[in-house]
Amino acid sequence: LNITDNGEFTFNSKVAPGDTYSVRVDEPPEGQDCLVYNRSGKVADSDITDVRVVCHNEYTLGGTVTGLGENLQSNLVVQYHTTSTPLKRSGPFTLHGTYRSGDNYSVTIRYQPKGHFCEIANGSGTFTDHNITDIEISCSDNRHSVGGRVVGLTGTGLALILTTDYHNEQEIKTIDSAGEFTFNRPFPSGESYRVYIKTQPSGQLCRLNNESGVVEDDDISNIEVICENSYSIGGEVFG
C-alpha cells in the first residue's frame, strides 16, 4: 500500500476472523524514518483501525575539513557516539548515520593524522529541523626539526646518521665544527628517531647523549655529541 499523505489508511486485502496480521514499513519516505505501533495481532470480530505509523524527519551530520595535505601517512579519525570514521582529505564530509530532531551529537578527534594537528569547532549540539553542516575541522602541518649541539670537536670527518621508523629512512650529516646542528628531514609529531655516529673524527672519539626519542609538539634540540681527543697506547718490545 502506497501512502502519500498523513491521515487514515486501509489495506485493500480483507482478513477473516482468527487470522493474524503484521504491518511493516516496506520503504520509508525520502528523508524520514517511520515506526509502526500496534503492528501485529489477531483479527477478532471487528475492523482493525489502531495501527499507527509515525514518521520522523532524518538529518545528517557533517561539515568541512581544511588543511590536510596529500599522501597522508595515516588518516584523521573522528569519533561520534560509538562510531569512528576516517577522513582522508580536505573538503566537505558527511558522517555515517541519520538523526532526529532533538538528538544530541558530539564529534571528537580519536586519532590525529601523522604529521598534522587538527582541532574541531562546532563539534557538539542538538539537532533541530535541519542537517548539521557547520562542523569545522582545521588541520595544520605539524612538523619539527631534530638536532642538537657538538662539544669539543677539533678533528675532521665526523658523520652522524639519523634513522626514522618510517620506511627505515636515513639521513647522513657531516659536521665540521663544534656548535649547533640540525638535520634536514622534518619530523611529524609521533614519529620516533635515533642518531648514530657513522664516522669518528680524526684523532678523537665522540659519544652521544639523548640520541633517541619520539617527536612530540616541539623541535628536538637536546641531542649532544661530546668529542674528546683520543690517544694511542704502545711502547717497545725488548729481547
Image (cartoon, helix red, strand yellow):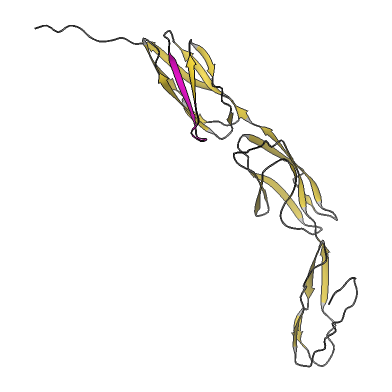
Residue occupying image coordinates x 87% and y 73%? 3
Number of numbered tags placed on the structure image: 0
- Which residue is drawn at the image coordinates 70% and 38% (left, top)? 119
Report which quarter residue 17 is drawn in: bottom right
User: In the rendered view, would you say 137 is above or below 148?
Assistant: below
Q: x, y percentage for residue 215?
A: 55, 30
Q: What quarter of the picture does the C terminus occupy?
A: top left
Q: Residue 203: within the magenta?
A: no
Where does the magenta region start and end? Answer: 157-170
Q: In the drawing, does residue 172 fall left or right of residue 6?
A: left
* Image vertical order of residue 33 relative to residue 128, above or below: below
Q: Nearer the viewer, residue 159 or 34?
A: 159
Q: Is residue 36 left or right of residue 113?
A: right
Q: Residue furthest left?
A: 239
Q: Quadrant of residue 116?
A: top right
Measuring from the top left, give residue 56's x and y in whole percent. Answer: 82, 64
Q: Is residue 210 visible?
A: no
- Judge by depth and name the residue closer to the eye, 144 or 174: 174
Residue at the image position 20 percent from the left and 7 percent from the top:
235
Q: Establish if 129 lies above or below 195.
A: below
Residue 199 appears in the rendering: yes
At which x and y percent is residue 218? 60, 27
Q: Quadrant of the N terminus?
A: bottom right
- Image location of residue 45, percent across then percent down: 82, 93
Q: Would residue 137 be found to the left or right of residue 168 on screen?
A: right
